Every structure is written in C-alpha cells, then in structure tokens.
Amino acid sequence: MKYDVVDVFSDKAFMGNPVAVVFPDREMSVDEMLAVTAWFNLSETTFVTNYDPEAASYDVRIFTLGQELPFAGHPTLGTAAAVRKNFAPEAKNLTQNCGAGAISLRFDAQAGTVHLIAPGVSLQPLKAEDQDEIAQVFGDDVPVQASARVDAGPIWVTLITDSPETIMATQPDLALLNEYSQKHGATGIQLAAGNPTGDIWKVRTFAPAVGVPEDPVCGSGNIAVAGLRRSAGLGTSDYVAKQGQEVGRDGEILVRYIEQDKIEVGGATRITASGELLV
C-alpha cells in the first residue's frame, strides 16, 4: 500500500504538522487502520479510497491514535495534497467525502497552498463551572475575553485572551486539562489572541485526552477560533494565525470568511516522505 507523509501549514520541511496518507489496495478493518495509525505515531493518519476522476472526488477516513474523526483540518489539507500528487497533478479543485460530508478544496498553484471550506461550526457558551475549572488549568494570568465550546468536527473549548504574549507564556496543567476534556467530551482546549491590527493571530491547541499534549498546528482548532472570533464581534477580515513555535514548528494558517457565513482555512503543504507499507 502506497503512502505519503505530508507536512501541512508550512512551506519549510519538518516545520508544519505531518499527516500520513495511506492508499489501501484492499478493504481494511477499523482495527487494521488503527494499527497502522499507531505505527506511524503521528497525530492523524488518513486512508483514501474511491478516487473518481470525473467528479474529482475521493473518500477518506481519518484516525487519531485512539479514534476515528468525522473531520479534521490539517489531515484534510494534507490528504488533498497527496491525492493531487498521485491522481490529479493539474487539479484546481477536489471534493473530499468524509464523516462530516463533502468538503470542497481548492489549490492556489501560484501561492503553493491548498484551502478547504469548513463544515459549519456551532458554538455553546461555557457554564460558570466550566470557566472555574478552566481557570484552574491555566491559572489567573490568562484573562478571558470570549469563550465557547465549539463544534468544528472535533469539539474545541476555545478561549480568546488579551495578547499573543499571554499565550506564549502560559504553562497549562496538562493533567487537569486532560481531566476536563474527558469529563466534558472535548477534544481539547485552545487559546487565541490577535495583534492590535487583527491581521495576525496567535493560537495554541492542547489535546492530551487524544494523545496530543500540544498540537503543532491545528486546522479544525483554527476553524473554531475563526468561528468564535466572528461570533464575539472581534472581526471578519482575513488573517493569518501563527502556531507551533513553542514546540519547534512554524505553522501559518490562512483564514478567510466567505459568503453565507462560511470559513475557509488553508496553507502550504509539502510532501516529506513517500513509500510502501509491506503488509
């Protein structure tokens, strides 16, 4: 079975968030896909089937180290880059069929980026007891300007705070964060803040409950941030999110609000490894 490893959200090798993209040559069971995912030991691995050249579409299943996801951002972008390389090198658009439905993707060949239109996000306000528990996770040095439980495929408890500097300096209690996430059925908790002009945002995403203490660069997490930013009245202009610098990466996520209240996220991708699974 052929595979590619794609670095997502950076044009520099090894500085984005990698995803393994597998092209099965036979039907695989969930246990087999989980075993392959565990062997790659990346935050996600995807399995692509049923590429249709006429529709420029394909089916994908997305796995973390412990579960299947209906949708995830950086695996979707990385999978699209691998499908384009293997099946449609001149494609300008693709459609991914996944648990969240049909996801539209476009390629900007000049910029070297790929972009997805996110499934709709839904937001729920946090209860007072949630806010108290989260304050214990991050301490009193993280003022919260806006917050919500955001369903962007995965569930992200998302907090907008006062400055990028606050986010860079924070050291959350990961044990408490893990406990909170499991108790409330969330994938994780994330922090976001904008600069004074609003065109550059800083994001950090923590998900120890799914085996990722800090996600280097998170697509669905940034979709959740964009949804909360809009809902809280903090802007609907295009912006760039920076993520991963605290864990040795340098991710950039391009965020755009488009018609009908939809959100587009994208970034650079780079295939860093290709091979075959000899199983």
Image (cartoon, helix red, strand yellow):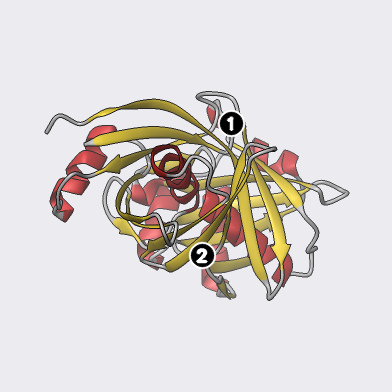
Per the rendering, the mark at residue 223 is none
Q: Nearer the viewer, residue 238 or 113?
A: 113
Q: Where residue 170 appears, x then y in whole percent?
A: 62, 40
Residue 144 visible, this angle: no
Residue 175 visible, this angle: yes
Q: Residue at x 35, y 60 (%)?
A: 182
Q: Where residue 176 appears, x then y in whole percent?
A: 43, 51
Quadrant of the rendered structure where residue 149 is? bottom right
Image-based side of 89 in relation to 3, left or right: right
Q: Which of 165 and 234 is in front in this view?
A: 234
Nearer the camera: disc 1 or disc 2: 2
Q: Residues within 10 Å of mark 1 (few under 14, many from 20)?
A: few
Q: Residue 116, relative to residue 203: is it above or below?
A: below
Amino acid type, callout 2: Ala
List the single residue furthest toward the right: 197
Q: Residue at x 55, y 63 (%)?
A: 118
| Quadrant of the image containing the C terminus | top left
Q: Earlier in the sequence, mark 1 or mark 2?
A: 2
Image-based side of 230 in relation to 153, left or right: right
Q: Residue at x 42, y 40 (%)?
A: 82
Q: Residues within 10 Å of mark 2 (few under 14, many from 20)?
A: many
Callout 1 secondary element: helix
**Callout 1 touching callout 2 (CB < 8 Å):** no
Q: Where residue 36 appears, x then y in whole percent?
A: 21, 40
Per the rendering, the mark at residue 152 is 2
| Quadrant of the image containing the N terminus | top left
Q: Name the residue under label 1.
A: 246
List the single residue furthest toward the front: 54
Image-based side of 174 in relation to 40, left or right: right
Amino acid type, callout 1: Glu
Q: Residue 197, relative to residue 272: is it above or below?
A: below
